[in-house]
Image (cartoon, helix red, strand yellow):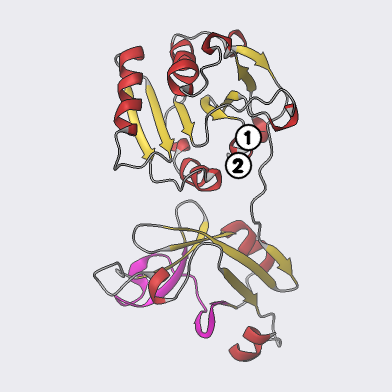
Amino acid sequence: MKIITLTSDLGLTDHYVASLKGQIYSALGDIALVDISHGVQAFNIAQAAYYINNSWNDFPKGTIHFLNVDSTPAIHIARPDNNTYPLVMQLNGHFFMGSDNGIFSLINGYENAERLVRLDFSAAGLDLRRPARNIYIPAMGQILKGVPLEKLGDEVSAVKQAFTTQPTLEKNLIKGTVIHVDTYGNVIVNITEELFKQVGKGHPFTIFFKSSHYFIEQISDSYADVPMGEKLALFNENGQLEIAINKGTVGSGGGANSLLGLGVKDIVRVEFHPKGSKDRIQDLFTS
């Protein structure tokens, strides 16, 4: 089965997704199209990368992942450094396709890409307003036929870099940032389990945010570890810190985002307490 995944900021209230799928089916025929998300905030490549990073490894090798967020090439003769070219990246047997606008640098493991090819878009002429129809879908067809990537354009050695907020470290402290709120109101933080263990070294800790009245002092294994409506912290299946309310969704008391007042870009602190160093929560919050 030939699979193409779609990640876009097209939304679902207009005809755009249906039109895109129609173009792909018309050109490529018997394939499977899988929607990762079409709810990406307009032009938000970091959010698009979050969705694809949490799903692409679940697909078989050979899958094409179309990153249709800010994907229209931008060619400036007078300012070539600002150009964004259509690109395909082969990574671990998968193919990622979209505009080289920084999104490729946000794909987990991109440094180990087997091949980076700037797609030849000369056939599109000056009509770059329809990049899916004129550039990306024809390239998908060639890849599905087994045409080597180097036949699709010029190989390049690097991709444009996008810079996102990273956790900051101080002595016995990780300061992270909320990077996503899911449909349940669960809050995902850019602190990985690996980093948590590396910095914490098994010491007791306090996770706190917004107010000293809200804090968590243990990591749960599942949502059911706490009573319904209680807050908890766990590391999700992708190894990222998640703050949640057990069965707390809109219409059922609210999720962590609404009940705890947490949103994207808010700060979440993890304070570790080596033996003899633990202070009162209020001291930690104001320090």
Residue 185 drawn above or below residue 215:
above
Per the image, label 2 sits on a secondary structure element best described as helix
In front here: 8 or 110?
A: 8
Circles 1 and 2: CB atoms closer than 8 Å? yes
Residue 189's spot in the image, x, y percent?
Answer: 53, 61
Tell me where the magenta segment starts and ends, as one range.
207-234
- In the picture of the structure, the residue carrying the numbered disc 1 is 110
Is residue 224 magenta-colored? yes
Q: Residues within 10 Å of mark 2 (few under 14, many from 20)?
A: many
Label 1 – label 2 distance at C-alpha: 7 Å
- In the picture of the structure, the residue carrying the numbered disc 2 is 106
103 left or right of 40 in image: right
Q: Quadrant of residue 227?
A: bottom left
In front here: 97 or 172?
A: 97
Q: Quadrant of the N terminus?
A: top left
Residue 253 drawn above or below residue 89:
below
Per the image, label 1 sits on a secondary structure element best described as helix
Q: Quadrant of the C terminus?
A: bottom right
Residue at position x 65%, y 90% in the image: 283
Query: Tag 1: residue type?
Result: Tyr
Q: Residues within 10 Å of mark 1 (few under 14, many from 20)?
A: some
Residue at position x 64%, y 21% in the image: 115
Query: Tag 2: residue type?
Result: Leu
- Residue 264 seen in the current view: yes
Q: Quadrant of residue 82?
A: top right
Q: Quadrant of residue 38?
A: top left
Residue at position x 67%, y 48% in the image: 163
104 left or right of 66 in image: right
Residue 284's spot in the image, x, y percent?
Answer: 65, 85
